Amino acid sequence: MAKLTILDTNVSYYSQKDEDYICLTDMARYRDSERVDYIIQNWMRNRNTIEFLGLWEQLNNSDFKSIEFDGFRNQAGLNSFALTPKLWVEKTNAVGIVSKKGRYGGTYAHKDIAFEFASWLSVEFKLYLIKEFQRLKDEEQRQLGWDIKRNLVKINYRIHTDAIKEHLVPESVTPAHANMVYASEADILNVALFGMTAAEWRRDNSDKDGNVRDYATAAQLVCLSNLENLNALFIKDGLSQGERLARLNAIAIHQMTLLTADAGIKRLESSKK
């Protein structure tokens, strides 16, 4: 369960089927932390709220019970009218509001509805909520893009290791010997690009988790992806490790010179930070 911090108020939210739901219970604490249920119910008895909820469901929910909705709409605004999120969902089969139990329990609403509730609470709160929510979604997209690039390197490494297995590993090789070949090939790329083996990096960076590639820049990851493909081709051409290392190092120097000056790579680097 992710959290937003809006004007010193922690607000939970979650995603389901590519839709985001924000906790109205947490949002209500901005107004009065002792009477959150009352605040939500007071908002729901408002005629404008009922109209908004009904229209949203009609647009997004084919199973919405319009007849029951009309009954609530006719009563909205009367002094005797009261409506809870649970009753609304049970009677109308609504999907825009969800009641959850447990550790992260409370009343959640689709972001469209949550933003409407925020307007009723406070215009200032709504603006900060939208801004912070959009910032986190943008951050998620940037992280997704970075993960895709990281996975691209992993896929290319699979191509790379398949080439090693086909052209360098004898048919009767032991598993231990095969692993040594794989590790040696990985270190050829590490030395060509980073100037050190994986073991040397771990020795010099004992205070860090992961490996040298986890701390690579965007330019280095792009270059590494290219080197892995080229090394697979060099292996198929029968070049020795020494020849491949010399070629890969020269290519890495050339590509890194170009990539570090590339404006697109610089933008990617700034988004990673």
Image (spheres, rainbow, N blue to C red):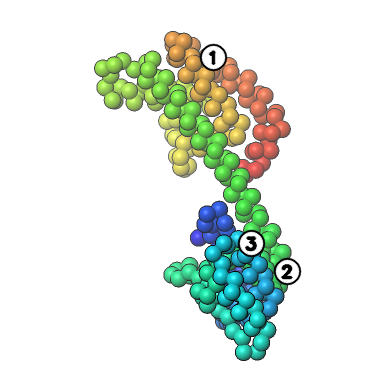
Q: Separation of disc 1 and disc 3 at Cα? A: 60 Å
- Asked if residue 199 lies left or right of residue 79, the reply is left
- Going from the N terminus, do you reach mark 1 or mark 3 first? 3
Q: Mark 1 or mark 2: which is in front?
A: 2
Three-letter residue code for mark 3:
Leu
Classify mark 1: residues with Cα within 10 Å, few (<14), some (14-19) or many (20+). some
Residue 93 rendering spot, x and y as whole percentages: 52, 69
Residue 181 rendering spot, x and y as whole percentages: 37, 21
Q: Name the residue carrying label 1.
A: 247
Residue drawn at the location 55% of the way across and 79% of the way down: 84
- Asked if residue 195 lies left or right of residue 184, the reply is right
Residue 195 rendering spot, x and y as whole percentages: 52, 25
Q: Separation of disc 1 and disc 2 at Cα? A: 60 Å
Residue 12 visible? The answer is no
- In what element is the residue under mark 3? helix
Q: Name the residue carrying label 2.
A: 124
Image mark for residue 219: none
Whether tag 1 and tag 2 are in contact, CB under 8 A, the answer is: no
* In the image, farthest residue toward the right: 123
Residue drawn at the location 30% of the way across and 22% of the way down: 177
Three-letter residue code for mark 1:
Arg
Image quarter where the C terminus lies is top right
- Going from the N terminus, do you reach mark 2 or mark 3 first? 3
Q: Name the residue carrying label 3.
A: 59
- In what element is the residue under mark 1? helix
* In the image, farthest residue toward the front: 67
Residue 225 visible? The answer is yes
Classify mark 3: residues with Cα within 10 Å, few (<14), some (14-19) or many (20+). few
